[in-house]
Amino acid sequence: MATPNLDHPTLELVKKQFPGVKFLASEFRGQTSLVVPVPQFHNVMAFLRDDGACAYNFLSDVTGVDYLNYPAAQPGGARFAVVYSLISHKHDRRLFVRALLTPSLDTSGIDEDPALHVASVCDLWPGAEWPEREVFDMFGIRFDGHPDLRRILTWESYPAHPLRKDYPLRGRGEREQFQVVGRDSA
């Protein structure tokens, strides 16, 4: 097994800026990931954008991950992650920043789980607005401070979050409730 190459220059800058925070870092196929604790998440993201030695000026993507039944346990028993893909054009670098979340309620329902909250980065990268809404809609993770956090792919009263791994593949009867509209009635 190859030893991970964790010499990404940004990692040392983040450790120096936030000396009391415990970070986790990993590397897979040349891509570096930084796991940031949820309470410090927004401050670290602001540092990554604003510090000249980091200069992550472009938010490429925001996605969610459900680690249910994942072969390797996640730190702290986390079930969900929100992953931000950042790019620094100035330094020609890419960094994946993850926030790990552990639900405190049964995650199969629509109920808001107080443990599934992370700070929004829409104030730092306005382009995060729609991807964060998609993660909210599909996984039920809420983004504190988001300017317009509502569903984007399903309707407001949709009874679940479809990309959670405990959601049935055939749904929960949502299709059977649709009224069939034919050509004559449209």
Image: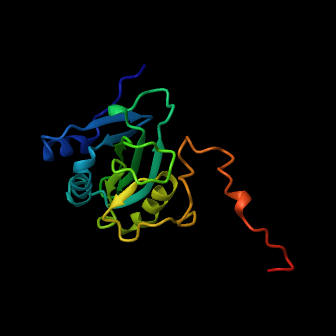
Residue 11, quarter of the rendered image: top left
Residue 180, quarter of the rendered image: bottom right
Residue 5, quarter of the rendered image: top left
Vertical side of 93 occupied by 71: above or below: above
Give 61 or 87, whichever is nearer the viewer.
61
Vertical side of 80 occupied by 159: above or below: below
Rendered location of residue 94, percent (x, y): 37, 49
Give 148 or 5, whichever is nearer the viewer.
148
**Residue that appears at 20% across and 58% down:** 52
Extreme-right residue of the structure: 184
Q: How is the image coloured?
A: rainbow
Rendered location of residue 7, percent (x, y): 27, 35
Left or right? Give the position of 183 relative to 14.
Answer: right
**Residue that appears at 82% across and 80% down:** 185
Give 108 or 53, whichever is nearer the viewer.
108
Vertical side of 16 occupied by 183: above or below: below
Extreme-top residue of the structure: 1
Rendered location of residue 149, percent (x, y): 41, 66
Figure quadrant of the C terminus: bottom right
Q: How many numbered discs, if any? A: 0
